Protein backbone atom coordinates (compact mmCIF):
# COMPACT_ATOMS: atom_id res chain seq x y z
CA UNK A 1 0.00 0.00 0.00
CA UNK A 2 1.34 3.43 -0.90
CA UNK A 3 1.64 6.40 1.42
CA UNK A 4 -0.24 9.66 0.93
CA UNK A 5 1.60 12.89 0.16
CA UNK A 6 -0.63 15.86 -0.56
CA UNK A 7 -3.41 13.86 -2.17
CA UNK A 8 -1.08 11.61 -4.16
CA UNK A 9 -0.63 7.93 -3.35
CA UNK A 10 3.06 7.28 -3.90
CA UNK A 11 6.16 5.38 -2.88
CA UNK A 12 9.01 6.94 -0.95
CA UNK A 13 11.66 8.99 -2.72
CA UNK A 14 14.15 6.20 -1.95
CA UNK A 15 11.90 3.47 -3.33
CA UNK A 16 12.41 1.44 -0.16
CA UNK A 17 9.55 -0.56 1.37
CA UNK A 18 8.99 -2.68 4.46
CA UNK A 19 6.61 -5.43 5.47
CA UNK A 20 3.72 -5.01 7.86
CA UNK A 21 3.35 -8.37 9.59
CA UNK A 22 0.66 -9.82 11.82
CA UNK A 23 2.07 -10.05 15.35
CA UNK A 24 -0.14 -13.09 15.99
CA UNK A 25 1.08 -15.44 13.28
CA UNK A 26 3.72 -13.46 11.40
CA UNK A 27 2.06 -13.41 7.99
CA UNK A 28 2.75 -10.42 5.74
CA UNK A 29 -0.31 -8.19 5.68
CA UNK A 30 1.05 -5.65 3.18
CA UNK A 31 4.06 -3.57 2.15
CA UNK A 32 4.40 0.15 2.82
CA UNK A 33 6.99 2.75 1.81
CA UNK A 34 9.78 3.82 4.14
CA UNK A 35 9.47 7.59 3.94
CA UNK A 36 12.61 9.71 3.97
CA UNK A 37 13.27 13.12 5.53
CA UNK A 38 12.95 14.49 2.00
CA UNK A 39 9.44 13.04 1.80
CA UNK A 40 8.63 14.70 5.11
CA UNK A 41 9.82 18.06 3.80
CA UNK A 42 7.76 17.60 0.64
CA UNK A 43 4.66 16.92 2.75
CA UNK A 44 5.29 20.05 4.83
CA UNK A 45 5.87 22.14 1.70
CA UNK A 46 2.49 21.13 0.31
CA UNK A 47 0.84 21.49 3.73
CA UNK A 48 1.60 25.22 3.57
CA UNK A 49 -0.74 25.47 0.59
CA UNK A 50 -3.19 23.11 2.29
CA UNK A 51 -3.38 25.31 5.37
CA UNK A 52 -4.24 28.34 3.22
CA UNK A 53 -6.94 26.40 1.36
CA UNK A 54 -8.43 24.98 4.55
CA UNK A 55 -8.50 28.32 6.32
CA UNK A 56 -10.36 29.92 3.41
CA UNK A 57 -13.15 27.33 3.52
CA UNK A 58 -16.25 28.29 5.51
CA UNK A 59 -17.06 26.00 8.41
CA UNK A 60 -20.11 24.52 6.71
CA UNK A 61 -18.02 23.48 3.70
CA UNK A 62 -15.45 21.77 5.92
CA UNK A 63 -18.28 20.06 7.81
CA UNK A 64 -19.82 18.77 4.57
CA UNK A 65 -16.51 17.16 3.58
CA UNK A 66 -16.21 15.50 6.98
CA UNK A 67 -19.79 14.26 6.83
CA UNK A 68 -19.01 12.55 3.52
CA UNK A 69 -15.83 11.08 5.02
CA UNK A 70 -17.87 9.77 7.97
CA UNK A 71 -20.30 8.04 5.63
CA UNK A 72 -17.39 6.38 3.82
CA UNK A 73 -15.90 5.27 7.15
CA UNK A 74 -19.24 3.66 7.99
CA UNK A 75 -19.33 1.85 4.65
CA UNK A 76 -15.75 0.62 5.05
CA UNK A 77 -15.95 -0.25 8.76
CA UNK A 78 -15.61 -4.00 8.29
CA UNK A 79 -12.54 -3.65 6.07
CA UNK A 80 -10.99 -1.23 8.54
CA UNK A 81 -11.74 -3.62 11.41
CA UNK A 82 -10.09 -6.54 9.63
CA UNK A 83 -7.08 -4.34 8.93
CA UNK A 84 -6.85 -3.41 12.62
CA UNK A 85 -6.90 -7.07 13.61
CA UNK A 86 -4.37 -8.04 10.96
CA UNK A 87 -1.76 -5.46 11.91
CA UNK A 88 -2.27 -5.34 15.70
CA UNK A 89 -3.40 -8.85 16.72
CA UNK A 90 -6.43 -7.27 18.39
CA UNK A 91 -9.51 -9.53 18.61
CA UNK A 92 -11.91 -8.89 15.75
CA UNK A 93 -14.76 -8.04 18.13
CA UNK A 94 -12.66 -5.26 19.68
CA UNK A 95 -11.51 -4.14 16.24
CA UNK A 96 -15.11 -3.90 15.03
CA UNK A 97 -15.96 -1.80 18.06
CA UNK A 98 -13.07 0.54 17.30
CA UNK A 99 -13.78 0.79 13.58
CA UNK A 100 -17.48 1.26 14.27
CA UNK A 101 -16.72 4.48 16.14
CA UNK A 102 -14.85 6.04 13.22
CA UNK A 103 -17.81 7.62 11.48
CA UNK A 104 -19.24 8.99 14.70
CA UNK A 105 -15.91 10.56 15.69
CA UNK A 106 -15.66 12.30 12.31
CA UNK A 107 -19.27 13.53 12.56
CA UNK A 108 -18.66 14.84 16.07
CA UNK A 109 -15.57 16.69 14.84
CA UNK A 110 -17.54 18.16 11.94
CA UNK A 111 -20.08 19.56 14.38
CA UNK A 112 -17.63 20.87 16.96
CA UNK A 113 -15.39 22.37 14.28
CA UNK A 114 -18.30 24.49 13.10
CA UNK A 115 -19.00 25.81 16.61
CA UNK A 116 -16.00 28.10 17.15
CA UNK A 117 -17.66 30.69 19.31
CA UNK A 118 -15.82 33.71 20.65
CA UNK A 119 -16.44 35.86 23.74
CA UNK A 120 -17.39 39.50 24.12
CA UNK A 121 -15.14 41.46 26.46
CA UNK A 122 -16.48 43.96 29.02
CA UNK A 123 -13.84 46.57 28.22
CA UNK A 124 -15.81 49.33 29.94
CA UNK A 125 -15.15 47.55 33.24
CA UNK A 126 -11.56 48.75 32.93
CA UNK A 127 -11.03 52.12 34.71
CA UNK A 128 -10.60 54.92 32.21
CA UNK A 129 -12.46 53.10 29.44
CA UNK A 130 -15.93 54.16 28.42
CA UNK A 131 -18.39 52.60 26.04
CA UNK A 132 -16.64 53.71 22.86
CA UNK A 133 -14.80 50.39 22.45
CA UNK A 134 -16.00 46.87 21.66
CA UNK A 135 -13.84 43.84 22.35
CA UNK A 136 -14.27 40.22 21.38
CA UNK A 137 -12.28 37.06 20.64
CA UNK A 138 -11.95 35.05 17.45
CA UNK A 139 -10.60 31.55 16.95
CA UNK A 140 -8.62 30.54 13.86
CA UNK A 141 -6.85 27.35 12.77
CA UNK A 142 -3.26 26.83 13.85
CA UNK A 143 -2.13 26.19 10.29
CA UNK A 144 -0.02 23.05 9.91
CA UNK A 145 -0.60 20.27 12.43
CA UNK A 146 1.76 17.33 12.84
CA UNK A 147 0.03 14.29 14.36
CA UNK A 148 2.02 11.30 15.62
CA UNK A 149 0.00 8.28 16.71
CA UNK A 150 0.68 4.93 18.48
CA UNK A 151 -0.09 1.36 17.50
CA UNK A 152 -2.63 0.36 20.12
CA UNK A 153 -5.73 2.12 18.70
CA UNK A 154 -4.77 2.78 15.08
CA UNK A 155 -8.21 4.11 14.12
CA UNK A 156 -9.44 5.78 17.30
CA UNK A 157 -6.29 7.73 18.10
CA UNK A 158 -5.66 8.76 14.51
CA UNK A 159 -9.16 10.21 14.24
CA UNK A 160 -8.98 11.98 17.60
CA UNK A 161 -6.17 14.02 16.05
CA UNK A 162 -6.82 14.44 12.35
CA UNK A 163 -10.63 14.85 12.45
CA UNK A 164 -10.70 17.92 14.75
CA UNK A 165 -7.63 19.34 13.02
CA UNK A 166 -9.30 19.16 9.60
CA UNK A 167 -12.67 20.27 10.96
CA UNK A 168 -11.14 23.50 12.27
CA UNK A 169 -9.37 24.35 9.03
CA UNK A 170 -5.84 23.02 9.45
CA UNK A 171 -3.63 20.97 7.16
CA UNK A 172 -2.30 17.76 8.71
CA UNK A 173 0.82 15.68 8.29
CA UNK A 174 0.22 12.34 10.02
CA UNK A 175 2.93 9.92 11.09
CA UNK A 176 1.21 6.72 12.26
CA UNK A 177 2.99 4.03 14.27
CA UNK A 178 5.44 2.03 12.19
CA UNK A 179 3.76 -1.21 13.22
CA UNK A 180 0.24 -0.12 12.23
CA UNK A 181 0.26 2.18 9.19
CA UNK A 182 -2.44 0.42 7.15
CA UNK A 183 -5.43 1.51 9.21
CA UNK A 184 -4.31 5.13 9.06
CA UNK A 185 -3.94 4.96 5.29
CA UNK A 186 -7.45 3.50 4.89
CA UNK A 187 -8.89 6.24 7.08
CA UNK A 188 -7.04 8.87 5.08
CA UNK A 189 -8.62 7.45 1.93
CA UNK A 190 -12.04 8.26 3.38
CA UNK A 191 -11.12 11.96 3.59
CA UNK A 192 -9.48 12.00 0.15
CA UNK A 193 -12.47 10.30 -1.45
CA UNK A 194 -14.81 12.73 0.35
CA UNK A 195 -13.27 15.68 -1.51
CA UNK A 196 -10.74 17.03 0.98
CA UNK A 197 -8.27 19.42 -0.62
CA UNK A 198 -5.30 17.27 -1.71
CA UNK A 199 -2.81 19.50 0.06
CA UNK A 200 -4.65 19.24 3.38
CA UNK A 201 -3.56 15.72 4.40
CA UNK A 202 -0.42 13.61 4.13
CA UNK A 203 0.29 10.26 5.78
CA UNK A 204 3.96 9.28 6.02
CA UNK A 205 4.90 5.67 6.75
CA UNK A 206 8.23 4.47 8.07
CA UNK A 207 10.60 5.26 10.90
CA UNK A 208 9.68 7.76 13.58
CA UNK A 209 13.37 8.06 14.37
CA UNK A 210 14.05 9.27 10.83
CA UNK A 211 10.98 11.47 10.43
CA UNK A 212 10.02 12.70 13.89
CA UNK A 213 12.61 15.43 14.44
CA UNK A 214 12.15 16.73 10.90
CA UNK A 215 8.41 17.08 11.38
CA UNK A 216 8.18 18.46 14.92
CA UNK A 217 11.08 20.94 14.66
CA UNK A 218 10.00 22.62 11.43
CA UNK A 219 9.08 26.24 12.19
CA UNK A 220 6.16 26.11 9.75
CA UNK A 221 4.44 23.60 12.05
CA UNK A 222 2.37 25.43 14.64
CA UNK A 223 0.86 22.44 16.44
CA UNK A 224 2.17 18.97 17.36
CA UNK A 225 -0.19 16.34 18.74
CA UNK A 226 1.57 13.19 19.98
CA UNK A 227 0.42 10.05 21.76
CA UNK A 228 3.12 7.68 22.96
CA UNK A 229 5.77 7.17 25.60
CA UNK A 230 6.85 9.78 28.11
CA UNK A 231 10.45 9.44 26.89
CA UNK A 232 9.53 10.33 23.30
CA UNK A 233 7.17 13.06 24.49
CA UNK A 234 10.00 14.61 26.48
CA UNK A 235 12.19 14.57 23.37
CA UNK A 236 9.45 16.24 21.33
CA UNK A 237 9.05 18.96 23.95
CA UNK A 238 12.79 19.62 23.81
CA UNK A 239 12.93 19.57 20.00
CA UNK A 240 9.74 21.26 18.85
CA UNK A 241 10.57 24.86 19.64
CA UNK A 242 7.90 27.51 20.14
CA UNK A 243 4.67 25.84 19.09
CA UNK A 244 1.55 24.34 20.62
CA UNK A 245 1.95 20.85 22.02
CA UNK A 246 -0.51 18.14 23.05
CA UNK A 247 1.35 15.22 24.60
CA UNK A 248 -0.61 12.13 25.63
CA UNK A 249 2.02 10.05 27.40
CA UNK A 250 2.55 7.09 29.71
CA UNK A 251 0.58 5.84 32.68
CA UNK A 252 0.34 3.34 35.50
CA UNK A 253 -3.32 3.64 36.38
CA UNK A 254 -4.47 2.73 39.90
CA UNK A 255 -7.81 1.37 41.06
CA UNK A 256 -8.73 1.53 44.74
CA UNK A 257 -11.03 -1.08 46.33
CA UNK A 258 -12.45 0.01 49.70
CA UNK A 259 -14.16 -2.28 52.24
CA UNK A 260 -17.64 -1.05 51.33
CA UNK A 261 -17.13 -1.71 47.60
CA UNK A 262 -19.35 -3.98 45.55
CA UNK A 263 -16.76 -6.75 45.12
CA UNK A 264 -18.58 -8.44 42.25
CA UNK A 265 -18.78 -5.16 40.33
CA UNK A 266 -15.16 -4.28 41.10
CA UNK A 267 -13.77 -7.67 40.09
CA UNK A 268 -15.78 -7.73 36.85
CA UNK A 269 -14.63 -4.23 35.98
CA UNK A 270 -10.97 -5.02 36.66
CA UNK A 271 -11.25 -8.28 34.68
CA UNK A 272 -12.26 -6.14 31.71
CA UNK A 273 -10.24 -2.99 32.36
CA UNK A 274 -6.93 -4.76 32.82
CA UNK A 275 -7.01 -6.99 29.75
CA UNK A 276 -8.82 -5.31 26.86
CA UNK A 277 -6.43 -4.96 23.91
CA UNK A 278 -4.02 -7.25 25.82
CA UNK A 279 -3.53 -4.48 28.36
CA UNK A 280 -1.99 -2.23 25.70
CA UNK A 281 -4.04 0.79 26.71
CA UNK A 282 -2.70 3.84 28.49
CA UNK A 283 -5.79 3.81 30.75
CA UNK A 284 -5.63 0.07 31.36
CA UNK A 285 -5.85 -1.05 35.00
CA UNK A 286 -2.28 -1.70 36.12
CA UNK A 287 -2.35 -1.28 39.90
CA UNK A 288 -5.14 -2.47 42.18
CA UNK A 289 -4.85 -1.08 45.71
CA UNK A 290 -7.25 -3.14 47.78
CA UNK A 291 -8.06 -2.66 51.45
CA UNK A 292 -6.55 -5.61 53.31
CA UNK A 293 -9.95 -6.36 54.93
CA UNK A 294 -11.44 -7.33 51.54
CA UNK A 295 -8.31 -8.43 49.67
CA UNK A 296 -9.07 -12.15 49.86
CA UNK A 297 -12.67 -11.69 48.75
CA UNK A 298 -11.58 -9.51 45.85
CA UNK A 299 -8.95 -11.98 44.63
CA UNK A 300 -11.36 -14.89 44.99
CA UNK A 301 -13.77 -13.02 42.72
CA UNK A 302 -11.18 -11.72 40.25
CA UNK A 303 -9.03 -14.75 39.47
CA UNK A 304 -11.78 -16.99 38.02
CA UNK A 305 -12.91 -14.14 35.78
CA UNK A 306 -9.40 -13.66 34.44
CA UNK A 307 -8.92 -17.39 33.95
CA UNK A 308 -12.12 -17.41 31.87
CA UNK A 309 -10.76 -14.89 29.32
CA UNK A 310 -10.54 -16.74 26.01
CA UNK A 311 -7.11 -16.34 24.44
CA UNK A 312 -6.32 -17.23 20.86
CA UNK A 313 -6.70 -16.38 17.19
CA UNK A 314 -7.79 -12.73 16.96
CA UNK A 315 -9.84 -13.40 13.83
CA UNK A 316 -12.20 -15.68 15.80
CA UNK A 317 -15.23 -13.86 17.19
CA UNK A 318 -15.11 -15.54 20.61
CA UNK A 319 -11.48 -14.55 21.29
CA UNK A 320 -11.16 -11.90 23.97
CA UNK A 321 -7.38 -11.61 24.13
CA UNK A 322 -5.07 -11.83 21.14
CA UNK A 323 -1.40 -10.99 20.80
CA UNK A 324 0.69 -8.07 21.89
CA UNK A 325 2.07 -5.89 19.12
CA UNK A 326 5.28 -7.94 18.84
CA UNK A 327 7.12 -10.90 20.28
CA UNK A 328 9.67 -8.47 21.69
CA UNK A 329 6.97 -6.68 23.69
CA UNK A 330 5.56 -10.01 24.89
CA UNK A 331 9.02 -11.06 26.07
CA UNK A 332 9.34 -7.79 27.97
CA UNK A 333 5.99 -8.29 29.72
CA UNK A 334 6.84 -11.92 30.54
CA UNK A 335 10.17 -10.83 32.03
CA UNK A 336 8.45 -8.17 34.14
CA UNK A 337 6.02 -10.74 35.59
CA UNK A 338 8.86 -13.18 36.32
CA UNK A 339 10.93 -10.48 38.01
CA UNK A 340 7.99 -9.53 40.22
CA UNK A 341 7.59 -13.19 41.21
CA UNK A 342 11.27 -13.51 42.08
CA UNK A 343 10.93 -10.44 44.29
CA UNK A 344 8.15 -11.96 46.37
CA UNK A 345 4.93 -11.41 44.43
CA UNK A 346 2.55 -14.30 43.74
CA UNK A 347 1.38 -15.06 40.20
CA UNK A 348 -2.15 -16.34 40.82
CA UNK A 349 -2.90 -17.01 37.18
CA UNK A 350 -1.28 -16.48 33.80
CA UNK A 351 2.19 -15.24 32.98
CA UNK A 352 2.97 -17.83 30.31
CA UNK A 353 4.03 -16.65 26.85
CA UNK A 354 3.80 -18.19 23.39
CA UNK A 355 5.22 -15.97 20.66
CA UNK A 356 3.55 -12.57 20.99
CA UNK A 357 0.74 -13.90 23.21
CA UNK A 358 0.94 -13.54 27.01
CA UNK A 359 -1.70 -15.26 29.11
CA UNK A 360 -3.77 -12.80 31.20
CA UNK A 361 -2.17 -12.54 34.61
CA UNK A 362 -3.08 -11.58 38.17
CA UNK A 363 -0.06 -10.85 40.37
CA UNK A 364 -0.72 -10.44 44.10
CA UNK A 365 1.42 -9.24 47.02
CA UNK A 366 3.14 -6.72 44.76
CA UNK A 367 5.41 -4.20 46.46
CA UNK A 368 3.86 -0.81 45.52
CA UNK A 369 7.35 0.67 45.18
CA UNK A 370 8.55 -2.03 42.75
CA UNK A 371 9.05 -1.43 39.02
CA UNK A 372 6.21 -3.86 38.30
CA UNK A 373 3.84 -1.43 40.01
CA UNK A 374 5.45 1.91 39.17
CA UNK A 375 6.59 1.47 35.55
CA UNK A 376 4.14 1.34 32.67
CA UNK A 377 3.62 -2.34 31.83
CA UNK A 378 1.42 -2.11 28.70
CA UNK A 379 0.54 -5.77 28.90
CA UNK A 380 -2.17 -8.18 30.15
CA UNK A 381 -1.29 -8.24 33.86
CA UNK A 382 -2.68 -6.54 36.94
CA UNK A 383 -0.61 -5.88 40.07
CA UNK A 384 -2.56 -6.22 43.34
CA UNK A 385 -1.21 -4.52 46.48
CA UNK A 386 -2.65 -4.09 49.96
CA UNK A 387 -3.68 -0.81 51.54
CA UNK A 388 -4.49 -0.29 55.22
CA UNK A 389 -7.22 2.32 54.72
CA UNK A 390 -8.40 5.05 52.37
CA UNK A 391 -5.56 7.36 53.43
CA UNK A 392 -2.87 4.87 52.51
CA UNK A 393 -4.69 3.86 49.33
CA UNK A 394 -4.87 7.45 48.09
CA UNK A 395 -1.23 8.01 49.00
CA UNK A 396 -0.16 4.89 47.10
CA UNK A 397 -2.28 5.86 44.11
CA UNK A 398 -0.60 9.27 43.94
CA UNK A 399 2.90 7.86 44.52
CA UNK A 400 3.62 7.69 40.81
CA UNK A 401 5.37 9.69 38.13
CA UNK A 402 2.15 9.39 36.12
CA UNK A 403 -1.35 10.80 36.47
CA UNK A 404 -3.56 9.82 33.55
CA UNK A 405 -6.47 7.84 35.02
CA UNK A 406 -7.67 6.37 38.29
CA UNK A 407 -10.68 4.53 39.66
CA UNK A 408 -12.19 3.88 43.05
CA UNK A 409 -14.87 1.42 44.17
CA UNK A 410 -16.85 2.48 47.22
CA UNK A 411 -20.46 2.97 48.28
CA UNK A 412 -19.52 5.94 50.47
CA UNK A 413 -20.26 9.37 48.99
CA UNK A 414 -17.77 11.03 51.33
CA UNK A 415 -15.04 8.67 50.18
CA UNK A 416 -15.94 9.34 46.57
CA UNK A 417 -15.70 13.11 47.05
CA UNK A 418 -12.40 12.71 48.85
CA UNK A 419 -11.03 10.67 45.94
CA UNK A 420 -12.22 13.24 43.40
CA UNK A 421 -10.35 15.97 45.22
CA UNK A 422 -7.20 14.12 46.23
CA UNK A 423 -6.39 11.78 43.34
CA UNK A 424 -3.79 13.29 41.01
CA UNK A 425 -5.20 12.02 37.73
CA UNK A 426 -6.69 13.67 34.70
CA UNK A 427 -9.59 11.17 34.53
CA UNK A 428 -11.21 9.81 37.70
CA UNK A 429 -13.91 7.13 37.69
CA UNK A 430 -16.13 6.36 40.66
CA UNK A 431 -17.22 2.72 40.78
CA UNK A 432 -15.49 1.89 37.52
CA UNK A 433 -11.96 1.54 36.20
CA UNK A 434 -10.08 4.19 34.18
CA UNK A 435 -10.63 2.13 31.03
CA UNK A 436 -13.67 4.01 29.87
CA UNK A 437 -13.76 6.95 27.51
CA UNK A 438 -16.42 8.86 25.63
CA UNK A 439 -15.22 10.57 22.48
CA UNK A 440 -16.69 13.91 23.50
CA UNK A 441 -15.19 14.12 27.01
CA UNK A 442 -11.97 15.98 27.88
CA UNK A 443 -9.16 13.44 28.09
CA UNK A 444 -5.60 13.96 29.27
CA UNK A 445 -3.25 13.48 32.18
CA UNK A 446 -1.24 15.17 34.89
CA UNK A 447 2.45 14.91 35.78
CA UNK A 448 4.42 12.61 33.47
CA UNK A 449 1.25 11.57 31.64
CA UNK A 450 1.35 14.65 29.48
CA UNK A 451 0.01 18.09 28.71
CA UNK A 452 -3.07 19.24 26.84
CA UNK A 453 -6.44 17.60 26.37
CA UNK A 454 -7.99 15.39 23.73
CA UNK A 455 -11.64 14.54 23.27
CA UNK A 456 -13.19 16.19 20.24
CA UNK A 457 -14.41 19.44 21.81
CA UNK A 458 -11.16 19.90 23.72
CA UNK A 459 -9.11 19.01 20.64
CA UNK A 460 -10.95 21.63 18.60
CA UNK A 461 -9.67 24.25 21.04
CA UNK A 462 -6.20 22.71 21.01
CA UNK A 463 -6.16 22.84 17.19
CA UNK A 464 -7.11 26.52 17.05
CA UNK A 465 -5.68 29.77 18.37
CA UNK A 466 -7.46 32.69 19.95
CA UNK A 467 -7.18 36.33 18.91
CA UNK A 468 -8.47 39.34 20.80
CA UNK A 469 -10.00 42.11 18.67
CA UNK A 470 -10.71 45.64 19.93
CA UNK A 471 -12.83 47.99 17.83
CA UNK A 472 -12.14 51.61 18.76
CA UNK A 473 -15.10 53.89 18.15
CA UNK A 474 -12.99 56.95 19.01
CA UNK A 475 -9.21 57.31 19.18
CA UNK A 476 -9.18 58.22 22.89
Image (cartoon, helix red, strand yellow):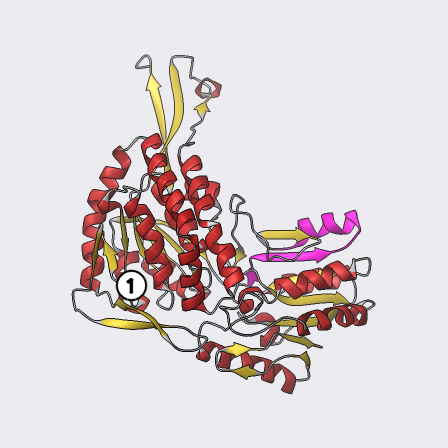
Residue drawn at the location 43% of the way across and 40% of the way down? 107
The relative height of residue 123 versus residue 409 in the rendered view (above or below) is above
| Residue closest to the far bottom | 342
- Left or right, 7 with respect to 382, comes to left
Q: Residues within 10 Å of mark 1 (few under 14, many from 20)?
A: many
The image quadrant that residue 361 belongs to is bottom right
Of residue 375 and residue 176, the one placed in the foreground of this image is 176
Of residue 466 and residue 359, the one placed in the foreground of this image is 359
* Disc 1 target residue: 205
- Verify whether residue 412 appears in magenta: yes
The relative height of residue 146 versus residue 386 in the rendered view (above or below) is above
Mark 1 secondary-structure assignment: loop
Residue 270 drawn at (x, y percent): 67, 63
Quarter the C terminus occupies: top left
Residue 459 at least partly seen = yes
The image quadrant that residue 168 belongs to is top left
- Left or right, 99 with respect to 341, comes to left
Residue 159 drawn at (x, y percent): 41, 50
Residue drawn at the location 49% of the way across and 73% of the way down? 324
Residue 126 drawn at (x, y percent): 46, 21
Residue drawn at the location 47% of the way across and 40% of the way down? 457
The relative height of residue 407 versus residue 297 in the rendered view (above or below) is above
- Verify whether residue 408 appears in magenta: yes
Magenta stretch in the rendered image: 400-424
Quarter the N terminus occupies: bottom left
Amino acid sequence: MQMLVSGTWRNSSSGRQEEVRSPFDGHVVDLVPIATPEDAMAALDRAEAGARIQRSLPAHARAEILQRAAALADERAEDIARTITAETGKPITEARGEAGRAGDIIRLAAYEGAQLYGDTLPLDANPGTGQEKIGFTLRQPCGIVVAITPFNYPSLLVLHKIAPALATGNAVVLKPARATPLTALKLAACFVDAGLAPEALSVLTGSGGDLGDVLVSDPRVRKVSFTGSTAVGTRIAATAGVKKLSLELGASCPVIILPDADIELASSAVAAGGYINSGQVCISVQRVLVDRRVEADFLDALVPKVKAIEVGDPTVASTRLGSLISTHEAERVEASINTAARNGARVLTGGERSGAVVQPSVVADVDPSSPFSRDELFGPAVAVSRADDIESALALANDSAYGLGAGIFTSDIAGSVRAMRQLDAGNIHINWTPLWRADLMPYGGLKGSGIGKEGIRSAVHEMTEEKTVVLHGRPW
